[in-house]
Image (cartoon, rainbow, N blue to C red):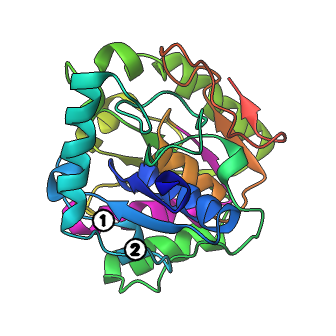
Amino acid sequence: MIWQMFRIIELTGGLGNQIFEYAVYLYLKRKYPDDRLYVYYTAHSFSEHNGYLEVTRHFDAEMPQPRPWLRYARALMLRITRLTGYRRWETTWDGPVIKDESYLFLYAYRNNRRYIPLERDWIRFKRPVLSQQNVDVLGRITSGSSVFVHVRRGDYLSAKYRDRFWGICTMEYYQKAMRLMRERHPGARFFVFSDDTAWCRNHITSTDNDMEYIDWNTGYDSYLDMYLMAHCKAGIMANSTFSYWAARLVRQKDVIYPVQWSRSQYGVPDIFEPDWIGI
């Protein structure tokens, strides 16, 4: 049958989501080696972030380019669904686990560990060209007891995401996490990464002169924040896939994460390592 011969997966979102999507792509490719696997996305798919497919540009990751006919196939699928109710494809995201892998059309974003390859090096950064400013901070990160602190505001303050994601990582969360990191890592130095560093300078503070604010990697270079975070010895995550992958890519053993990830009906995603600390 046609849906057993090929399937189409749709990509969307920022870099953290795209890494999860790449994991799903590899999962389907390995599980169904005889099927043709197509990837669909448009420039609009990434418009809320940097506007392009970042995962293949900044990582050693390969996915096929979308074929021109896929947009017409997708439009036809949606029209048939509206007219007849017939479903051999997904029309909306339905949770962290694919409910029916036989569907012809699948949304790729799935935040569940079942899709993450077990191999250590299944995804790696391409060697970036670093500015002197980044070279200097990377030296301080790798030579000391470094802890990244990730604070996500930006789109989480918008009407689209506020009710689902905002207000979970409170000031109390960051204060408690930093106290715990100071206990576990005497002499720790905190490197703060955020899409609102000005806010962080006023709220994520310390009297011990042990904090640095990284505020220069923006736009195309924003992925370099993930690269620098990934080299820290430990990390304090936001409820964000961006800081999740920063923590996971180099297998940090000492990571603090928010036990509440969102206010969606799906609850806490099954993505965290057993030796990470939930607050």
| Residue 6 point in image, percent of width and height | 48, 62
Q: Residue at x 15, y 51 (%)?
A: 44
Residue located at (23% from left, 24% from top)? 82
| C-beta proximity under 8 Å, tags 1 and 2 | yes
Residue 19, position as x, y percentages in the image = 49, 58
In this figure, which residue is indicated by the disc labeled 1? 53
Res 212 visible: no
Left or right, residue 171 beside residue 75: right
Please, what secondary structure does the residue beneath circle 2 have? helix
Q: Which amino acid does label 2 sit on?
A: Thr
Q: Mark 2 points at which residue?
A: 56
Total of numbered circles in the picture? 2
Task: Tell me the crowding category of disc 2: few under 14, some 14 to 19, or many 20 or more residues within 10 angstroms, Cα based.
Answer: some
Viewer-nearest residue: 29 or 181:
29
Q: Which residue is drawn at 30% across and 61% down?
A: 222
Magenta stretch, main secondary structure class: helix
Instruction: Name the residue: 39% across, 17% down.
Output: 164
Please, is residue 133 above or below residue 94 in the view?
below
Q: Is mark 1 on a helix, strand or loop?
A: loop
Q: Is residue 98 left or right of residue 197?
A: right
Question: Vertical placement of 2 versus 121: above or below?
Answer: above
- Magenta span covers which residues? 219-237
Tell whether 213 sits left or right of 170: left
* Quarter of the rendering containing residue 175: top right
